[in-house]
Amino acid sequence: MKVAIINDTHCGARNSSDIFMEYQGRFFEEIFLPYLKEHNITRILHLGDYYDHRRFINFKALNHNRKVFLDKLRSHHIHMDIFPGNHDVFYKNTNELCSLKELLGYYTDCITIHMDPEVITYDGLNIGLVPWINSTNYARCVEFINKCKAPILAGHFELEGFEMSRGIVNTHGQDVGNLDRFEAVISGHFHTKSSQGNIHYLGSQFEMFWNDCGDPKYFHILDTETREFEPILNPLTLYDKIMYNDTNQSYDNYDVFQHENRFVKVIVVEKTDMYSFDRFIDRLQDVKTHELKIAENFDEFVGSNVEDESVSLEDTTEMLDSYVDATDTELDKDRLKGVMRELYVEAQNLEIV
C-alpha cells in the first residue's frame, strides 16, 4: 500500500493572495491529485499547518481550497488523516480551539482529525501521530513518544539544529522525548527538506517566500511494505533569481519568457555594458511578471578607501578577493571570487518575506 504525505499547505497563505491561491490550486489539480489517480493512491497523511493564519480565514481562500482540493478528495474517494500544526490552533498554549475542527467538520466522511497523540495503521504498518506540542499537552505527548511501539513517528515538531528554511537553522527547541528509538521520524513545520539520522523534515510543497527560491519542494509517498519515503518533486515555482554578469554571459538571446507569471529578482554581479543591461531589463519588463526587482552593488560609490596592505577595509568585495588570493587551494580562484561576489550581492539584498 502507498500513502501520500503532505504538510504545511497553508491555505490562505500571503494574506490569501490570488497569486498564491492559483499557484496552490495548480499543484493540487495538475500535480498532486493526478499523481494519486495514476498510482491508485487513496490515503493521505497531512502533518499539520493545513491553514495559514492562526486566528482567521479568508472566505475566498476557503472557497477556493474547497473546490480545488477538499471536494476532489470526496469525489475521488480519497481519505485524509490530519493533525494540527501550530498555524492550525488559535491559542499558543492549547490545541483546543482548532481551525481543523471548525472548518473541516463537513468533510468527516473523508477526513479524520487527530487531536491527541495516537497510533494509526496503514495496511499493517503502525504510525504514531503527534499533534502540535504545547504547554497543555506536553506531558501527554512526551509520554506517548517514549512508549509508542510504532516504527514510524509523524509530528509537527520544532527541533533544534534543523533548518527552518534553507540556510537558517533553528537554535532552540523542545525536548520531546526519545526520538532515536524510532526507525523514522517525519515532521512538518520547517519549510525546507532536511534529514539528520532518523529524523526527516519533509519541507513544504510550495514556494511561499523569496528564501524558498531555488529550494526544491516535494510531496512524499510512503510504501508501507518497504517503509521507504519517495520524494516527488513539485515542478511549479513562483520565484526566479537572475544573477546578471555580462562578463561571462551574453543576454541578447536570453529567454525572458521563462519568467512569465513569476516574482523575478535581477541581482547585478557585474555590469560592464549599460546599453545591453537596459535593453535586457526592457525585455523583462515586457513580460507579464508578478513583480520585478533589481538589486545592484553600489560599491563604486564608496568614499575614500583606507588601505592596509592593499586591502580596502571599506570595499568588501575587494577584501573577499584578497582572501581568496591568500587561500592555499587548487580550486579555480577566479571562479571562487565570482561565487563569493554573487553571495555578497545577494546578501546585501536579502529578503525573508
Image (cartoon, helix red, strand yellow):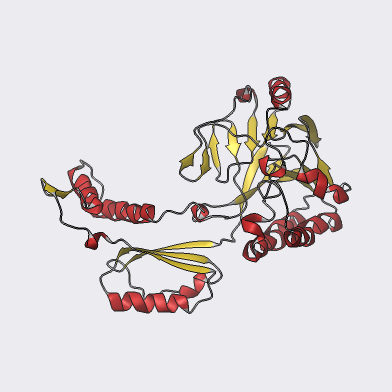
Left/right placement of residue 183 relative to residue 300 reads: right
Looking at the picture, does residue 121 appear above or below residue 28? above
Which quarter of the rendering shows the N terminus? top right
- Return the residue nearer the eye: 31 or 101: 101
Q: How many labels does the image show?
A: 0
User: Which residue in the rendered view is the most extreme toward the right?
Assistant: 109
The answer to whether residue 304 shows anywhere in this view is yes
Residue, far left: 309
Give the vertical position of 182 relative to 106 (above or below): above
- Indicate the position of residue 270 as horizontal and vertical percent values: 29, 64
Q: Which residue is drawn at 59% across and 59% down?
A: 235
> How far across and down, in percent of the image, does residue 35 sit?
71, 56
**Position of residue 34 measured from the top left corner of the image (x, y, whole percent):** 73, 60
Q: Picture quarter containing residue 83? A: top right
Question: Which residue is drawn at the image coordinates 68% and 23% (left, top)?
Answer: 142
Residue at the image point whose x is 66% and y is 37% from the top: 156
Residue 195 lies in what quarter of the image?
A: top right
Q: Can residue 253 be seen in this view?
A: no
Q: Position of residue 230 (x, y in %)?
A: 63, 45
Q: In which quarter of the image is residue 209?
A: bottom right
